[in-house]
Amino acid sequence: MAEFKLPTLGESATSGTVAKILVAPGDTVAADQSILELETDKAVLEVPSTVAGVVKELLVKTGDTVNVDQPIFSYEDGAGASAPAAAPAAPAEQTAASTAPAPASNGTAPATAPVKNDGVVDTASPVGTQAPAPVVNTPGESKTPVAASPSIRRLAREKGVDIYAVKGSGIGGRITENDIAEFGKAPAPAAAPAGTGSGITLPPLPDFSKWGEVNRVPMSGIRKATSTQMMRSWTIPMVTQYDKADSTAFDAFRKQYGPLAEKRGAKLTPTAILLKIVVAALKKFPDFNASIDFSTNEVVQKKFYNIGVAVDTPKGLVVPVINNVDRKGIIELAVELGEIAATAREGKLKPDQMSGATFTLSNLGGIGGTAFTPIVNSPEVAILGIARGAVEPVWNKETSSFDPKAMMPLCLSYDHRVIDGANGARFTRFLSALIEDPSLIALEG
């Protein structure tokens, strides 16, 4: 009997939470077949099998936190003969504890995302139906084996029921399907104070049903991961500066070279052009392409330019990374951006496609809004947001009159421990100069 172990997830991901198990004992698994969905701090990933054979026993359950190299299931090689039946092993419920409780109700929300011309934004759509997570088990808690068949264990996992808390009514205390159903109807225990992921403990919520009807919608894995990361980022002493750039020439540039991108099967979106403009600014202002090393009290300026791009998906916000933007042309970036945004919306991003970013770009222009405050994605020190452009009256000194100009709103957030306001203003003015004259990209980028 061999064991399939969780493979490496990426350079920065060493663990995740089991969101959904896609195989069952007795299933024949092929190499590269998806065997579970894993929630990391960046996204929900489909984990492929690296082995082929027949699944004998699941060693994890939905809601478990699993680490790289941890056994996921035992199996027999597909070419081997079946071994004699062994005594029942410790059930999957005895593995690592769940990470968070979930409401007993299985609420749903529409899985629709707004249609955008860019496909790249910093907003979360309503999540789709999510399987409820099981009740929390205390790490290291000793569990007494329970009398329950594999089908009953599976039913308990699907309903989010801690099978160890169920009292069996069958022969010899065996747990039945009715026991699981009745347990699921029981009122949930009072919740402990909730943590925010930033060391702050929040008091329990009041009973909102006292004032009216409520609907509980389980947070998706991506939404929970985003919540944790945003609370962590909120500890950054952050400043947001706003500016506007005349995008008349930028829009003309995009219209002129759009057909070239279409010949390559891509769309020349504003984000593709902005990627090159951002890199030119990062080269001129290296503190924006940096991180803080508190162990040595140093600012780590990076000589590579990997830009994270916020993408709206049916399951929530994800931030895939376009690597080495400085080495690629705008048309090449347009092609890659379209491909990685599509992969993100399909939920098929790999860990290495979401790691290594040095700066983040979030373009909400395709949806709307005059301005917003993007949150710095730690350990980065800056993020650029783009809001919806509009034609505005701009004073013309030469004619002493107002001229109609297409203006692009810029929203730059940065870590004030590294970047001062004066440099923040210089950064946005440099961005504006290249937006107002895209031909400078060839000189500066």
Image (spheres, grey):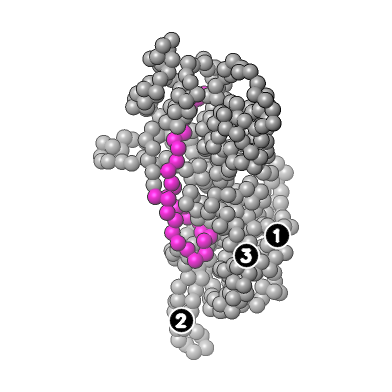
Q: Residue at x 61, y 66 (%)?
A: 334
Characterize the local packing of mark 3: few (<14), some (14-19) or many (20 or more) Cα atoms within 10 angstroms.
Answer: some
Asked whether residue 274 is in view, the answer is no
Foreground residue, 287 or 322?
A: 322
Q: Name the residue under label 3.
A: 335
- Looking at the rendered structure, which numbered label has been put on residue 10? none
Foreground: 3 or 68?
3
> Quadrant of residue 413 in the image?
bottom right
Residue furthest top in the image: 172
Residue 279 locus on image (x, y percent): 66, 64
Name the image quarter holding the N terminus: top right
Q: Name the residue under label 2.
A: 404
Which of the labelled discs sits on residue 324, or is there none? 1
- Magenta highlight range: 110-139
Residue at (53% x, 78% y) in the render = 248
Query: What is the three-letter code of the residue carrying label 1?
Result: Asn
State the quadrant of the C terminus.
bottom right
The relative height of residue 169 versus residue 30 in the rendered view (above or below) is above
Residue 242, position as x, y percentages in the image: 51, 64
Q: Residue at x 49, y 74 (%)?
A: 407
Are there few (<14), some (14-19), or many (20+) residues within 10 Å of tag 2? few
SS label for mark 3: helix
Q: What element carries label 1?
A: loop
Q: How crowded is mark 1: few (under 14 residues within 10 Å), some or many (20 or more)?
A: few
Q: What residue type is labelled 2?
A: Pro
How far across and how far down the image is residue 324, in percent? 70, 59
